[in-house]
Every structure is written in structure tokens, then in C-alpha cells.
């Protein structure tokens, strides 16, 4: 499993639209092969800074999502709200407690 | 719920000991009030860089853990393995799909 950190600083006036867009986008990404879950995290020290954390069965599943039309549409809608972005990919080496068994 | 990011760069020769310590430490932290889960993430671009991500019902539960003797013991054991560390706390504003219902 991989965890993808999309770190974003949003412009002051765009925060609510950014969050509303994520609530809708979460349902879009839900249907992708390999998608496990999404967590949207807000920095306690900087309320305009977020980490959008998506979890994927396999790195290639994330790459396929990133190259999809839906991804381009979702990100083009919100790009004007973002002041800074950064993307990092991590391998999940430990996860406890285990909440579900892998499918294979 | 809050998510605590403990970002660490470990020294080259300490990686396996660092991971072994985390496997044991996970069981220690498991018993703390408010602890939800732990994820250990390894940077795909820098295998010596990790994010130890712990999830807590409430920020105060994390603070209590951070001030406990067990925390001091766990971190003193591994501090010699770490070259750089950084701590950030995030509020969880969205988490989908929901895998379990909150207790209250």
C-alpha cells in the first residue's frame, strides 16, 4: 500500500470552496481501482494548510488516477484556490491495528 | 480526531533498528487512552525518511502520551538513530470511507 501526501496552502478566501470541492472529489476518486481511503487534514498551526492524504493498494493505481481525465478536471477546478502545492509518495511499512484483511 | 506527523530522517545504519523499535513501540502506544492507529510511512524517494503517523481521538490524548514516561523511554531509545525530526499536528476534517462508527 502507498500513501500519497498532497500538501496544499489555500488562499484565505478559498478555504470553504476548497473543502467543498474535496467532499465532492472524494466520491469521484472512490471509484478508482486500488483506491483505499482519503483523509483531509488541516494544520493546527496554519488553518490554510492542508494535507490531502490518499491511500492506494499499489503505486501504479495512483499513477493511473493521476493520468486520468477525472484527475485533470478535479484539479483544474481547484487550482485557482491554491497558493502552494507539494506531492510526496510513501510506502506503508507498518499499519496497526489492522482494520481489514487484504484481498489477496 | 487529530493526526500527528512525526517526520524523521534516520542515519543510514540505524534504519532496521528504527523500524524494529517502532514495531515494539506500536504495542506500547496501543494502550493509551484515545489512541486510534499508527501508520509508519517510508518516503519513496528517500528510504531513510519516515513519517510516523499516529491518530488520536482528541488532541489532549496525544499531549498526555507525549508527557508520559513511556513516551520518554521510547524516544530516548531511538533518538541516537535519528538525524532530523519534525512534529506537526493536524485536525482530521474529512475521512472517507468511514470504517467504524465513533463511540459517542
Image (tube, coloured by chain):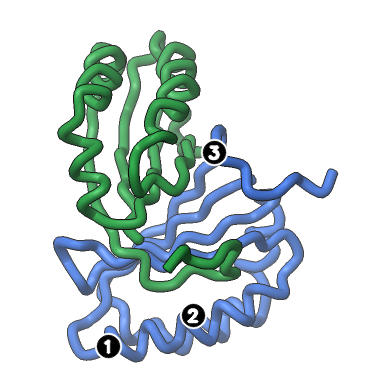
Chain colours: A blue, B green
Give the label on residue A14, or none: 1
Quarter of the picture containing the C terminus of chain A is top right
The answer for how far apart the CA atoms under marks 2 and 3 are is: 32 Å
Name the chain under label 2. A
Query: Tag 1: Cα neighbours inside 10 Å, few (<14), some, or many (≥20)?
Result: some
**Could you tell me residue A11's position as x and y percent?**
22, 82
Name the chain under label 3. A
In percent of the image, x 36 and y 84: which residue is there? Answer: A18
Q: In the structure shown, which secondary structural element does the residue marked by tag 1 occupy?
A: helix
The answer for how far apart the CA atoms under marks 1 and 3 are is: 35 Å
**Could you tell me residue A95's position as x and y percent?**
55, 39
Residue that label 3 marks:
A96
In percent of the image, x 35 and y 49: which residue is there? Answer: B34
Mark 1 vs mark 3: same chain?
yes
Q: Nearer the viewer, mark 1 or mark 3?
A: 3
In percent of the image, x 58 and y 56: which residue is there? Answer: A55
Q: Nearer the viewer, residue A55 or B45?
A: A55
Q: In the structure shown, which secondary structural element does the residue marked by tag 2 occupy?
A: helix
Instruction: Tell me: residue B19, above or below residue A101.
Output: above
The image quarter containing residue B104 is bottom left
Query: Tag 2: Cα neighbours inside 10 Å, few (<14), some, or many (≥20)?
Result: few
Quarter of the picture containing the N terminus of chain A is top right
Residue that label 2 marks:
A75
**Could you tell me residue A91's position as x and y percent?**
56, 40
Amino acid at each position: 500500500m502507498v500513501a500519497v501526501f498532497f500538501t496544499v496552502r489555500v488562499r484565505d478566501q478559498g478555504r470553504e470552496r476548497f473543502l467543498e470541492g474535496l467532499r465532492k472529489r472524494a466520491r469521484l476518486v472512490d471509484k478508482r481501482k486500488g483506491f483505499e481511503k482519503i483523509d483531509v487534514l488541516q494544520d493546527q498551526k496554519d488553518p490554510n494548510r492542508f494535507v490531502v492524504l490518499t491511500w492506494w493498494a499499489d503505486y501504479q493505481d495512483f499513477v493511473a488516477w493521476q493520468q486520468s481525465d477525472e484527475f485533470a478536471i478535479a484539479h483544474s477546478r481547484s487550482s485557482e484556490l491554491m497558493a502552494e502545492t507539494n506531492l510526496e509518495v510513501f510506502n506503508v511499512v507498518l499499519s496497526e491495528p489492522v482494520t481489514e484483511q487484504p484481498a489477496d
